[in-house]
Amino acid sequence: MGKRKELKDGDVEMGGTNRPHDDDSGSEDDVDMVNVDFEWFDPSEIDFHGLKILLRQLFDTDAQEFDLSALADLILSQPLLGSTVKVDGKESDPYAFLSVLNLQEHKDNPVIKDLITYLQRKASSKPAFAALSSLLSQDPIAPIGLILTERLINIPSEIVPPMYTMLLEEIAWAIEDKEPYNFSHYLIISKTYQEVASKLDMEDSRPKKKKRAGDQEPEVFLFHPEDEVFQRHALCHGGFEYTHPPEEGASDSKRAFQELGIKPAGSLILIEAPKFEAAVKDVSDYLKPPV
């Protein structure tokens, strides 16, 4: 499988992440503008600790369920598949990553065994995941491409299309080389959140009113805007509660510049392989910066 070129954001449309300041304009927009050069790299050993941090962020309170060191090592064992995104050169830590693992190929790896068991448990908990539950229960398990991807907060979503586009190219090259990346489905693990009342701002500790029948459920938000597009192409998708509840006050620690706290949850999106390329194209169109 051929090694792809390293990319800089000058090679793709980034919608303002690399625009020069106009010191003479004096506009308010320029005050908030930050010049950042994003670069795309193949995963390498230097990324081990950075990948563990991003994997811990992806799995949130359930990260303790998995050997993240082993999972990072598995991602790094296929360096020509997937991407890391950096701003300070190849030797720096990744700000984002994307990789795919063949659940069937690695089914005997202890960390993948743990992941499959975890996914089976979540998939069997909701009727909406019936198709996924059936695939995960096959013996041997179906050739599902498990997509793992995460990025630090406030990283622009425009970095996402190049990662997925390169992944499709790399999978095609791998299949030509008879490598085990001919998937039947792709399963994306992601995250959602709900806004919850902040305990820090409560003026008293009066008990909340009991929820009545017909009361509206809290709105669910996506951490990653591309998930909205992927869900349109999905065979099934939905959210799930983490096995390990957050610690007291954790929602306030995640509330980042807003009055309400944040309660995260997991998300699964299952896409049939023949529909994945079209889904990636729609993500690219959706996240294209405005002209």
Image (cartoon, helix red, strand yellow):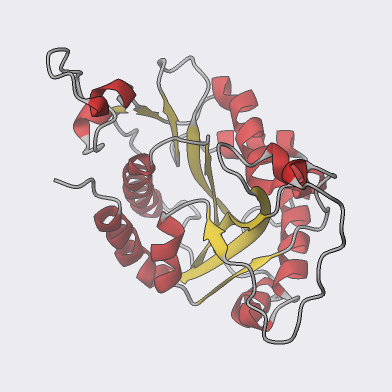
User: In this rendering, does residue 149 appear at all?
Assistant: yes
In the rendered view, tell whether residue 67 sits above or below residue 125: above
- Residue 37 placement, left or right of 155: left
Which residue is depicted at the point 33% across and 47% down?
A: 161
Q: Position of residue 57 (x, y in %)?
A: 65, 40
Q: Quadrant of residue 86?
A: top left
User: In this rendering, does residue 233 appear at all?
Assistant: no
In the rendered view, tell whether residue 8 sits above or below residue 272: above
Q: Position of residue 80 (x, y in %)?
A: 43, 36
Q: Nearer the viewer, residue 277 or 211?
A: 211
Q: Nearer the viewer, residue 242 or 47?
A: 242
Quarter that holds the C terminus? top left
Which residue is depicted at the point 52% across and 51% down?
A: 223
Which residue is depicted at the point 53% across and 42% down?
A: 150
- Residue 144 placement, left or right of 252: left
Q: Nearer the viewer, residue 79 or 267?
A: 267
Q: Quadrant of residue 75?
A: top right
Q: Quadrant of residue 214?
A: bottom right
Q: Position of residue 206 (x, y in %)?
A: 87, 58
